[in-house]
Image (cartoon, rainbow, N blue to C red):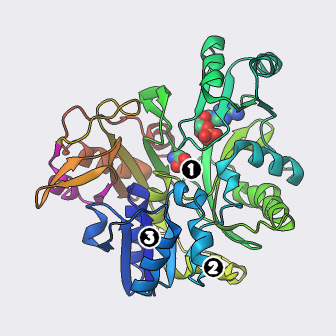
Amino acid sequence: MKALVLGGGGREHALVRALSLDPGVTGLHCAPGNPGTSDLAENHVINMLDGLAVTELAARIGAELVVIGPEAPLMAGVPDALRSRGIPVFGPDREAARLEGSKAFAKEVMEAAGVPTAMARVCRSPGQVAEALDAFGPPYVVKDDGLAAGKGVVVTEDRAAAERHARECGRVVIEEYLDGPELSLFVLCDGIHAVALSPAQDFKRAYDGDKGPNTGGMGAYAPLPWTPPGLVDEVMRSIVGPTLSTMAQRGRSYQGLLYVGLALTSGGPRVVEFNARFGDPEAQVVLDRLATPIGALLQAADTGGLGGITSLDWRTGAAVAVVIAAENYPADPVKGDPITGLDAAEAVDGAYVLHAGTAWSGVRDLKSNGGRVLNVIGTGDTLARARERAYEAAGRIELRGSFYRTDIAEKAAAETG
Ligand code: AMP
Ligand code: GLY
């Protein structure tokens, strides 16, 4: 099969890598891609939000599968355009992707489906905001209703900061605070059937000890040794099944990746958020461990063929991703600085590097070109070993002013070895 991956971040590099390891994939393209994907796929310069341009590219290269990486092309209806031309696509249509695109829509679907989540109120005025903050109490959770790439959420004890964020956003969703560890579960969906991948954990705050601002994600690991037995089955039964049925009843069949962000509260798993695409950087570790060839799996989400898949194969051991972020990420990342040390990092046994915010500088040199610049992946028999390798490799990369968290998977590795 010939496949085209849309996007140019670390998640897309991981998708391209996974597809490149699938013997069923005979041609691999990426648009726009990044310097990392260009080693494995042909990169194409394109506006990935332009459904017509993407459809033309897919038709020209004979793509039999288009995998949409980030949320923006989903919200722009690129899958709709591809499907209308009969090109198989992994990613929900625009209306179904509103599960991510509108927090208020997601809450409404969850309510209709009886899915456990935080109590929430949609607020449009300062008066409604004040009432909701009073009703739920601190810590305050204030979410921009629109798409904000994981950065539109403020969780704070500071009432003034909560009110300020609400004012800046306009329409917001204010929620009850969910206590308990968080995890991300990726579920492949074909509208009716669903297949869960292995859970992963992400680290959203910028600095060690979960300090600092929320980011797109500073690191991840999988598998999670601490999840209670039966958790995935319970989530599939109480959350994913009812959500897919409710979406189908509304004529918005959900085909693609349903990212279930969960908090394990004392009252059981509850949904923190839905996203309509793989998490970044969680995908980097989950895809590392998936041994089942991925191409046919992603294609089956489009053709309604996931019902025939009873289980997936996983590599033993663990994977840890450490994000190297640019100086001043997430507020105003510095770009354009030289990056060196990638070869030395990849010389670490069991480690490799996935590109995110990088660009060519001259013919073969690299420079930083985004907030999250690189993902360093460490693998090993144990979480501790994977972690050690990720950090050994991360320490070999040089980018002026860059930083990374030093506590990714630390607690889980200490508990399990
Ligand atoms: P979201 O974009 O909805 O995933 O929110 C980003 C992050 O904010 C989540 O990963 C959580 O860490 C935190 N968060 C969001 N909603 C809640 C909630 N109701 N209670 C506690 N933390 C939350
Ligand atoms: N890592 C969180 C996200 O992709 O939204």
| Separation of marks 1 and 2 at Cα, in angstroms | 43 Å
Distance from mark 3 CB to nearest ligand 2 atom below 8 Å: no
The nearer-to-camera label among 3 and 2 is 2
Q: Residue at x 35, y 54 (%)?
A: 377
Left or right relative to 265: residue 160 = left
Amino acid of disc 1 = Pro
| Separation of marks 1 and 3 at Cα, in angstroms | 31 Å
Q: Earlier in the sequence, mark 1 or mark 2?
A: 2
Helix, strand or loop for disc 3: strand
Name the residue beneath numbered marker 1: 225
Q: Mark number for residue 5?
A: 3
Extent of the magenta region: 338-355
Q: Nearer the viewer, residue 365 or 241?
A: 365
Residue 171 in view (yes/no): yes
Q: Quadrant of residue 378?
A: bottom left
Residue 210 lies in the magenta stretch: no
Dividing the image into four quarters, tell me where ligand 1 lies. top right
Left or right relative to 395: residue 264 = right
Residue 368, image x and y in percent? 24, 45
Packing grade of label 3 (10 A; few <14, some 14-19, many >=20) is: many
Q: Up-down: is 295 above or below 290?
A: below
